[in-house]
Image: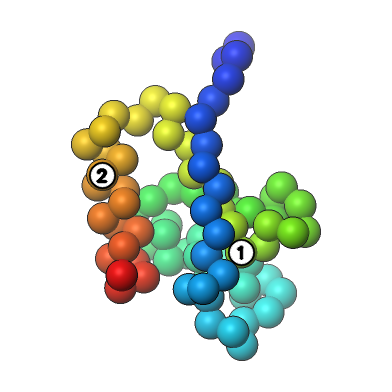
Amino acid sequence: KPEGAFYFFPNFTALIPADLEGEAREKYVFEKLMEAGVAVVYGSCFGKYFTDNVRISYSCTNEEQIMDSIARIKQAFNL
């Protein structure tokens, strides 16, 4: 049984088109990141105030994989 984990919970409000609402808004970031090969969990799973967030785990991830994921996130949002 794990005794802890490491997560970060970034907010993507500034990158979500303003006209998206409801389920489309919840799925926007999730789908873009999954298409880029970055596995995340919907922020809304953690409450109604986290619709524009996703949860990313990095507890068993080496530095090279983290840097690759950051590059994929940037590419997914043209940053």
Label 1, label 2: how far apart the Cα atoms are = 22 Å
Q: Position of residue 40 (x, y in %)?
A: 50, 49
Residue 44 sits in which quadrant? bottom right
Question: Badge 1 is on which residue?
Answer: 52
Specify whether 47 is left or right of 31.
Answer: right
The numbered dot on residue 38 is none
Label 1 neighbourhood size at 10 Å, few (<14), some (14-19), many (20+)?
Answer: many
x 51%, y 60%: residue = 30
The residue positioned farthest toward the left in the image shown: 64
- In the image, residue 5 sits, relative to residue 3, either above or below, namely below
Q: Position of residue 11 (x, y in %)?
A: 55, 59
Q: Split into 4 quadrants, where in the image is the C terminus?
A: bottom left
Q: Split into 4 quadrants, where in the image is the N terminus?
A: top right
x 68%, y 57%: residue = 50
x 62%, y 75%: residue = 24
Label 2 neighbourhood size at 10 Å, few (<14), some (14-19), many (20+)?
Answer: few
Q: Amino acid type of disc 1? A: Asp
Residue 48 sits in which quadrant? bottom right
User: Which one is earlier in the sequence, the residue at label 1 or at label 2?
Assistant: 1
Q: Position of residue 67 (x, y in %)?
A: 26, 44
Question: Badge 2 is on which residue?
Answer: 67
Provide the secondary structure element on which disc 2 rests. Answer: helix
- In the image, residue 51 sits, relative to residue 57, either above or below, namely below
Residue 22 sits in which quadrant? bottom right
Provide the secondary structure element on which disc 1 rests. Answer: loop
